[in-house]
Image (cartoon, rainbow, N blue to C red):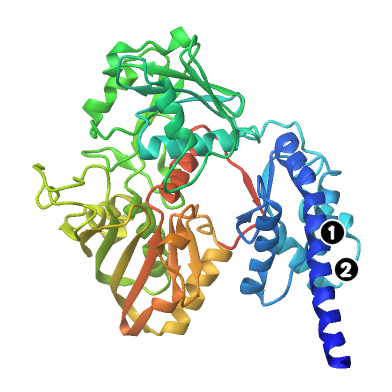
Amino acid sequence: MDQDKASQDARDICFQEWQENEALAEEMIPLLGQLYRKYNVVPSLYGRSLIIRSVIRILKNHRYVKKVEGTELSVRDTLPFIKAMTELELGPAHIDLGKLVVAFKRSGRSDVKAYLGEELGELVGAHGTNGMGGAPKDVVLYGFGRIGRILARILVEKAGGGNLLRLRAIVVRGAGDDLEKRASLLRRDSVHGPFAGSISVDHENSALIANGQVIKVIHADSPADIDYTEYDINNALVVDNTGKWRDEEGLSQHLASKGVAKVMLTAPGKGNLKNIVYGINHTDIGDDDRIISAASCTTNAIVPVLKAINDEFGISHGHVETVHSYTNDQNLIDNYHKGDRRGRSAPLNMVLTETGAAKAVAKALPELAGKLTGNAIRVPTPNVSMAILNLNLARPADVASVNAYLRQVSLDSPLHKQIDYVDSPEVVSSDFVGNRHAGIVDAKATIVDGNNAVLYVWYDNEFGYSCQVVRILQSMSNVNFLYLPRTRD
């Protein structure tokens, strides 16, 4: 009986601790909202954002720290930091609260506010200073398919923190009687779930209202039909999601529309267009660059990992095989298609096809020009893909050293937003739906034998890629956040 009572007491204590942690997380939410909306501060725990997160997600993000550092991190540890941060009049920044709190606990110090004053000194008292590019930038989404709608979700979400990108309009084909359907497609998504907020339709003004943001719906068959200034849209960034034009000549049509300043293509650009992978060559974007490409989802997934490996081990040559979810340009059932094999039913077949990702790597990483080959297999899943990097290294290595290096890069390097790292024998593709990194290294699958290495990189080819696109938009608009604590170069 005594043993049964002890077991019951232990269960009661465990559940009580959980409830207390839930209560602390609930207390944390309005403070996080204040940091975000008033100060444009985005706190995270080892890259896992705490903004617009549920109580359970906040607790799970705290749990994640144990996987990274081997030490528990509780809301009891982080709440005093969040309270103190709301009192420091901070300037805009992304702050990895997890790294700060873990370092504080290990230091043996006790004065949280004094510690934050030292670690965040360049931000303290900087609220209201203009460090992010001036006035808000108008953004127009030309095309409202899979990528367009995810970009809309991300832009609407980020507007709460005043990040200076305003989604002002979307451009679609049609006669103008499709607002309800457009709203429904943004509101509900079979892969990514429901929209986080409220969407209504303003028929009189032909607009969608998403979380209070008025988004004009413009119906047009070509850029030549549009004068954006009629809608009070000026110096806009147009994001072309259609893929209809992929060279400078075709995309220049957007620049002829009144109110347009710059254009971004969400597909690999042809000719001399700069193909930008954020985190790798985004600093190559000049003020005079009016048309750029955000490359492809696969290029964004593999280039950061390839750069990291090349910097540390060197790459003599290699092959990239992508296992890619089917896309809208394939057929649901067997039917005519101008592309080889793509006419066969996408949900029923693995379809061998080409990918330009290996060649596209050279546009972002010239040092790998001519060193990579590539191919692709389309598979019957709607989202999340994988790139298999079969590399010949310049110097020998082993699994432990390669994985340890990539783990460190994912946590503490300028590529921490691009490269994620997972070390679980149970993960599958659906586990990465909504992952905001360009790619996720699967450590359990890594193979290294001397100079030969095989890396498996998951990527959400819709959401992760769209996050990269938004990062480029921010860069083009001079929206440059400070990241603290600073990462290693």
Relative to 272, say whether 200 is above or below.
above
Q: Which residue is mark 2?
A: 109
Q: Evaluate whether residue 485 shows in this view.
A: no
Residue furthest to the right: 111
Q: Earlier in the sequence, mark 2 or mark 1?
A: 2
Percent position (x, y) of residue 292?
Answer: 34, 35
Disc 2 residue type (three-letter): Arg
Q: Tag 1's secondary structure?
A: helix
In the rendered structure, the answer to whether residue 210 lies left or right of residue 341 reads: right
Residue 132, picture quadrant: top right
The local secondary structure at tag 2 comes to loop
Q: Is residue 128 above or below residue 404?
A: above
Which one is in front, 106 or 362?
106
Location of residue 141 in the rendering, given as x and y in whole percent from the top left corner:
41, 28
Q: In this image, 43 relative to 346: left or right?
A: right
- Say if mark 2 contacts mark 1, CB within 8 Å: yes
Nearest the viewer among 440 and 335 is: 335
Is 28 left, or right, of 344 in this rendering? right
Which one is nearer the viewer's eye here, 334 or 105? Answer: 334
Residue 30 lies, in percent from the top left, at: 78, 43
Amino acid type shown at disc 1: Tyr
Q: Residues within 10 Å of mark 1 (few under 14, many from 20)?
A: some
Image spot of residue 163 (x, y percent): 61, 34
Label 2 – label 1 distance at C-alpha: 8 Å
Mark 1, residue position: 115
